[in-house]
Image (cartoon, rainbow, N blue to C red):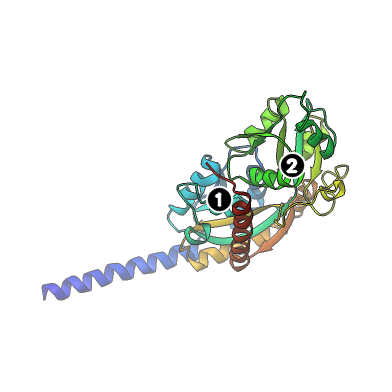
Amino acid sequence: MHRLFSVVSVCSVLSVAAVSTVQAASDFPTRPIRMVVGFGAGGATDTFTRIFAGPLQTALGQTVFVENVAGASGYIGWRTVASATPDGYTLLMSENAIVMRPGFKDVKPTFDPAAELEPVAFIATSPLAVCVSNTVAANTMKELVDLSHSPTAKKLTNASAGVTSVSQLSWEVIRDATKLDVLDVPYRGGGPAMADLIAGHVDINVASSQVAKPLTETKQIKCLAVTSAKRSAALPSVPTLAEQDIKTADVDLRFWFAIFGPKNLPAEVKTKIQQSVQKALTDPTLAERLKGLDITPEYGDSTVLAARLAKDIKNWGAFIEEKGLKGQ
């Protein structure tokens, strides 16, 4: 009789827990949502997330606050979300650095986004720009290449958002295509890297066009090329790499943004976030701001995002292996 009572009690507890979980999912969201960014303030992902957070919180009906959890080229932020309770209240706004890290077999600890995170929604893309300090005596990619090989010039430095970051890997593709001779200087995010470029402490930085646009317009830096197939609407006077006869490896050099959650995110919660993302992207004020920053909305659901993960992990992994790149 005692054993029967215990079994009934356990079943009752599990039943209540299940009902609570379903109710929590159906009521979502009932409190503020934490949107983690794996890099410091001022970088491309942080900038986009803070612009997008307003329309998203309007669509969700709850505050969305952005938290920068920087370090280890995004890993600390990714791990923070992967380890969070899968209830939708901790999400990750990531860029494509997350598909590049798996290609570095020497980097420990490893991180597999397909296995450790729940794809929620693909949001937008943006081209990259090759930026240089005003102290650099080059106004074209050819002049930059020639300067890097000059026996009388100082050694040029490239500032990236960190080893295995989008800016670093994109730079490796561009360096491979141009044979630039440059010393790498990794930073803890794109914001600090760009700050030192503006100050003239480093010479080169590959950044998103959204970050480069206002700095170029105010002549704080120079942009020598964009990575898109056509000229950037944000930087129309800057030629593409292709226009300067630079043929890069067959990888996508665009920046992209997507939302992930912890693994096993409830389907109903995921659907509500997806619907809110779609609604946010129809906001006319947001659309105008993104257009000005050369960010193209490109919504995709979790299936689309999962397929992109698989493709990009494969393609970047092949480039990293072929070139013998190391993450440490």
Compared to residue 7, the image places residue 135 above or below, namely above
Is residue 228 found left or right of 182 in the rendered image? right
Residue 86 point in image, percent of width and height: 45, 58
Q: Residue at x 61, y 51 (%)?
A: 320
Residue 33 point in image, percent of width and height: 52, 51
Circle nearer the N terminus (2, 1): 1
Which is more toward the observer, 111 or 58? 111
For disc 2, the marked residue is 179
- Residue at the extreme front of the image, as rendered: 151
The label nearer to you, 2 versus 1, is: 2
Q: Residue at x 55, y 61 (%)?
A: 119
* Quadrant of res 13: bottom left
Say if residue 150 shows up in the picture: yes
Is residue 231 found left or right of 185 in the rendered image? right
Compared to residue 323, the image places residue 156 above or below, namely above
Q: Secondary structure at mark 2?
A: loop
Residue 322 point in image, percent of width and height: 62, 53
Q: Residue at x 59, y 46 (%)?
A: 325
- Residue at the extreme left of the image, as rendered: 1
Identity of the amino acid at label 2? Answer: Lys
For disc 1, the marked residue is 101
Q: Residues within 10 Å of mark 2 (few under 14, many from 20)?
A: some
Is residue 104 found left or right of 281 in the rendered image? left
